[in-house]
Amino acid sequence: MNYIEIEDYADSETIDCVLREITKLYEGESHKGKFVNKDDIKIFTINGLNLLNNIPEILSLYNYSYDYIRRKYYENLEHINEMDIAISANVLSYTNTDKFRMHFDRHQVTCIIYLSNNPLMPLKLYPNVRPDPIINGKKDFELSNYKPINIKPIKNKAVIFNGNRSFHGVELSPNDNEVIFNDCRYSLQFAFNLIKNISYTRDAYYGR
């Protein structure tokens, strides 16, 4: 698999519900989530059981994504035991110049679901620029032969790619002539593996 974009991905009422509830968590004073501003990551995030306890509807989107990817692309798709790695919601504000540095994921398969439109904060993606480090070990990679793909967030669009092989991040695009629909970029991230029982218990992670 290179990367996949799917519009009108999931049930629209569920998407609307999840967006409303994440907006409440982001704008409220309950401190259910975490504001991160370090290591070139500036973001609001909430994940794992904390997220599911506050917005249980997300579990149906997670299960739908697992079944969809398993049926369409990877029959050997596996759940990740650490729920804070497996399920997260992120909010980035354009006016606050939030960002998420270029990186590789630690897991093998990533599914992003956009909950709002925000063309000024696209996903910058270099698909499959290195071998899978879980199987082959970490190796040097070279971007000069690859052209990045910029994927603009559109509500209810999913992007599926090989997370630990694809270099990606979120960067502001201030020269874009499109009208911004929402200051904030709301998204869900689901993580999966193709190998059983990989542990991330001791890993550092911005959401922890």
Image (cartoon, rainbow, N blue to C red):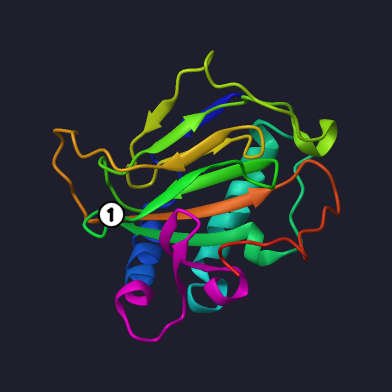
Q: Quadrant of the N terminus?
A: top right
Residue furthest bottom as drawn: 30
Q: Position of residue 115 (x, y in %)?
A: 37, 53
Q: Quadrant of residue 129?
A: top right
Of 30 and 60, nearer the camera is 30
Residue furthest top as drawn: 145
Amino acid, disc 1: Thr
Judge whether 107 appears above or below 143 on screen. Answer: below
Neighbour class for label 1 at 10 Å: few (<14), some, many (≥20)?
A: few
Of 201 and 64, nearer the camera is 201
Name the residue: 56% across, 27% down.
127
Judge whether 176 appears above or below 54 on screen. Answer: above
Left or right of 96: which side holds 158?
right
Q: Quadrant of residue 206?
A: bottom right
Mark 1, residue position: 97
Residue 176 in sight here: yes
Name the residue: 62% across, 45% down.
105
Of 194 and 35, nearer the camera is 35
Left or right of 6: which side holds 164?
right
Q: Position of residue 170 (x, y in %)?
A: 40, 44
Q: Position of residue 208 (x, y in %)?
A: 61, 70
Name the residue: 53% across, 53% down.
189
Left or right of 75: which side holds 36?
left
Q: How many marks?
A: 1
User: Is 188 one of the magenta-colored residues?
Assistant: no
Q: Position of residue 87 (x, y in %)?
A: 59, 60
User: Which region is colored magenta?
Assistant: 24-51
Of 165 and 63, nearer the camera is 165
Residue 6 in sight here: no
